[in-house]
Image (cartoon, rainbow, N blue to C red):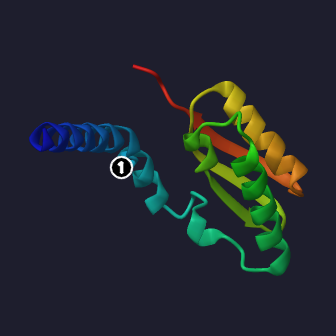
């Protein structure tokens, strides 16, 4: 009985790891982050105001039960009140909702560079 349970758990873990690896690979997307033209998390301003804006947006996104985990993990970069959103989301609806949270969170402007994940 113990062997069956252990085998089942191991199978589940391997399947979950395979799924996570398949869906978490951002290698292609990250290649464009190596240029100076793309805003990345390393560009986040450290001013009190910009950190507060980023935190307010992140809190609103995380509390939104209508968003997927993917949408809740987008990059939010604030520089002088201007917010850039980057990363994958599941739908155009999610893309729009995340942008709405950014605007409500105090952003002066929002550059929405979120990408809708293509379904296979």
Residue at 77% across, 42% down: 99
Asked which quadrant contains residue 77, the reply is bottom right
Residue 87 is left or right of residue 4, and the answer is right
Residue 41 rendering spot, x and y as whole percentages:
59, 65
Q: Residue furthest front?
A: 1
Q: Residue at x 62, y 41 (%)?
A: 114
- Percent across and percent down for residue 90 are 57, 30
Q: Quadrant of the C terminus?
A: top left
> In which quadrant will I find the N terminus?
top left
User: Which residue in the rendered view is the most extreme toward the left?
Assistant: 3
Task: Find the residue positioned furthest to the top.
Answer: 120
- What residue is shown with label 1? 27
| Mark 1, other Cα within 10 Å: few <14 / some 14–19 / many ≥20 | few
Q: Nearer the viewer, residue 34 or 72?
A: 72
Q: Is residue 58 left or right of residue 108?
A: left
Residue 67 placement, left or right of 89: right
């Amino acid at each position: 009985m113990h062997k069956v349970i252990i085998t089942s758990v191991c199978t589940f873990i391997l399947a979950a790891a395979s799924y996570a690896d398949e869906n978490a690979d951002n290698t292609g997307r990250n290649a464009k982050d190596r240029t100076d033209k793309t805003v990345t998390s390393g560009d986040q301003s450290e001013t009190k105001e910009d950190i507060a804006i980023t935190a307010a947006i992140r809190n609103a996104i995380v509390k939104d039960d209508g968003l997927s985990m993917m949408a809740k993990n987008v990059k939010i970069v604030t520089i002088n009140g201007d917010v850039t959103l980057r990363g994958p989301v599941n739908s155009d609806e999610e893309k729009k909702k995340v942008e709405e949270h950014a605007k409500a969170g105090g952003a002066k402007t929002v550059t929405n560079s979120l990408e809708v994940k293509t379904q296979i």
